[in-house]
Image (cartoon, rainbow, N blue to C red):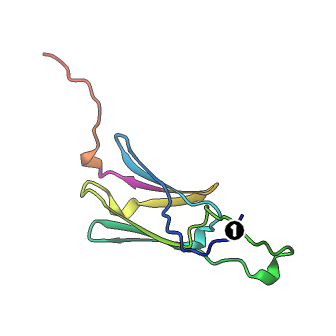
Amino acid sequence: MDRQDYETFSIPAVNISENFSIFAIEIAAPGLKKEDFSIELDKQVLTISSKNHPADDSESEIKRKFNRKEFNYGEFTRSFKIPETVNINEIGANYESGILSITLPKKEEEQDIKRMVEIS
């Protein structure tokens, strides 16, 4: 294989889901540490960014030359406009097994609560 020098641009894949009490955002970002992420909320815009700090070559026992390297997100930024129904004081995040999970709880009064109505 010939080695080609070119810059690749990639952003991690995102899943967004919702149930009656929360919105959830999952970002596939393998190979990072939780310290590499920054999550900010400014005027109903949630911004997730990352800086990948490559390992120091002296730490590695074997130096590798990649012919092709596809799963490397050097730096990325993703922004999402969040609804006003989100309780911004209770937003949480977790990074496990290469997935950054962000939970955005809905405000209590905005939750679709199923209830029975008595007929009189």
Whole-percent x and y of residue 116? Answer: 25, 24
Count of labels shown? 1
Q: Nearer the viewer, residue 40 or 68?
A: 68
**Where is residue 57, by image quadrant?**
bottom right
Q: What kind of secondary structure does the magenta stretch mostly adopt?
A: strand
Residue, far right: 61
Label 1's element?
loop
State the residue at coordinates (58%, 60%): 95
Whole-percent x and y of residue 85? Answer: 26, 54
Residue 49 in view of the camera: no
Q: Which residue is mark 1?
A: 2
Query: In this picture, which residue range is highlighted in magenta?
Result: 102-107
Q: Indicate yes or no whether the magenta region holds residue 56.
A: no
State the residue at coordinates (16%, 16%): 119
Residue, far top: 120
Looking at the rendered image, the quarter that the N terminus falls into is: bottom right
Residue 61 drawn above or below residue 98 = below
Q: Nearer the viewer, residue 80 or 83?
A: 80
Whole-percent x and y of residue 18? Answer: 37, 44
Residue 99 drawn above or below residue 32 = above
